[in-house]
Amino acid sequence: MKAKKWLTIMSLIVSLLALVAAFVIGKDSNCIYYDVSMALLGSAVLGFIMSITEYYVERHKAMEEFWIQATNILKELRKIKHLDMDAPTNLIIEAFGEERSNEWNQMFSLLSEDKEIQHRAKDNLISWYEENISLPFDENTDVEKELEKLYQSKMEGYQKTFMHCMNGYQLASSVELGTLDNAYGNLDFIFANKCIRKKAYDSIYDKIRKIVIQFKTEAYHFNLLEDGKGNFPVCATKTSDLDKEYFLSKEVTEHGYTYTLVYQNIFDDIDASLEEFRSKIYRTKYIEPKREPISGKIIYFGEDKNKE
């Protein structure tokens, strides 16, 4: 792209210099320099016409390549999974932290007799279940035993969900930025160069690059956990923080139903910028793409709760 740009500029400059020289020398001078300047002018103008034609072809290709590479990477980043829990995430993470702390206390119980097994976070989570989930217990049910079974079952499911989400961030962190770097570096134009590059950098390239770098940073901890060297509650907290940053939940009420819809808000912003960039490539009217939820569930129906 840069070669075509500078070839076009240089051929234009030579054309202008040859034209000025021809005017200065004059047709009636009978000087060989006039003939040389006219010959040079004709060759330079022909070269300029050819180079400007190739320039616009390369300009289109360069912008198209950047759009393709950014779109492909965005598709890979969108594969991260939403952390969908049926209980408050903070209570769940606190329970995981408490379990880990109890495990360490049991391991080092011989070194200190002051360490006690804690159940506060566990009790808080179980209390939440009792208040918010319809439990099929009757007078013949051993409630304490059933709640313990429910707690253990839920915690196993939560752990699998967290690990599934962590795996998604690990895969997203492996996205290569080399082709996007090259595509952005190849954006070099004669007209509005600074404006086009800045727009592409601020709204697309830099955002994607920072997201991948962030995923790589957090994936380091997830990889340690996968190798048996990490701290699950810490990784669960990092996963929750990432989920809050990259997923946006909205409540929408229609015809008596209340839905919770989940959007990938940051990726949707980048996608809108990519569509705007594409409209410039093909010189079409920009129409902001419709933001589609990645998941949703019904919360209420009229006055009754109808979860999931």
Image (cartoon, grey):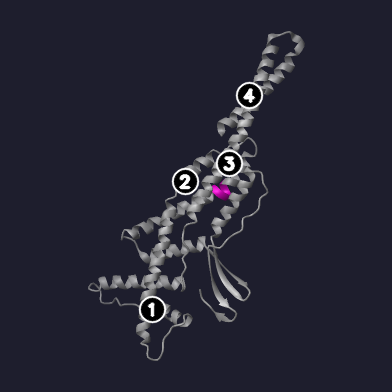
Compared to residue 147, the image places residue 66 above or below, namely: above
Which of the two labelled residues, at mark 2 and mark 4, occupies the earlier sequence position?
4
Q: Is residue 32 magenta?
A: no
Q: Position of residue 168 (x, y in %)?
A: 43, 58
Q: Amino acid at mark 4?
A: Gly
Proximity of marks 1 and 3: CB atoms separated by less than 8 Å: no
Local packing at callout 1 (Cα closer than 10 Å; few below 14, some 14-19, many 20+) is: some
Helix, strand or loop under label 4: helix
Q: Nearer the viewer, mark 2 or mark 4?
A: 4
Looking at the rendered structure, the secondary structure element under dot 3 is helix
Residue 198 vs residue 252, the one in the foreground: 252
Q: Which residue in the protein does label 1 denote?
A: 150
- Give the residue pinned by disc 3: 63
Compared with 275, 229 (above or below) is below
- Residue at the (40%, 76%) spot, across then down: 121
Q: Is residue 204 magenta?
A: yes
Mark 1 and mark 2: Cα distance apart in space = 45 Å
In the image, the segment drawn in magenta is 201-205
Q: Check disc 4: other Cα within 10 Å, few if <14, some if 14-19, many if 20+.
A: some
Q: Residue 97 got which mark?
A: none
Q: Earlier in the sequence, mark 3 or mark 4?
A: 4
- Relative vertical location of residue 155 with respect to residue 55 in this rendering, above or below: below
- Cα separation, mark 1 vs mark 4, equals 79 Å
- SS type, badge 2: loop
User: Residue 196: percent from the left, percent from the top?
Assistant: 61, 43
Residue holding disc 4? 47
Q: Amino acid at mark 3?
A: Met
Q: Which residue is mark 2?
A: 177
Indicate which disc, 3 or 2, sits on the residue closer to the N terminus: 3
For the residues labelled 3 and 2, say whether their Cβ atoms are less than 8 Å apart: no
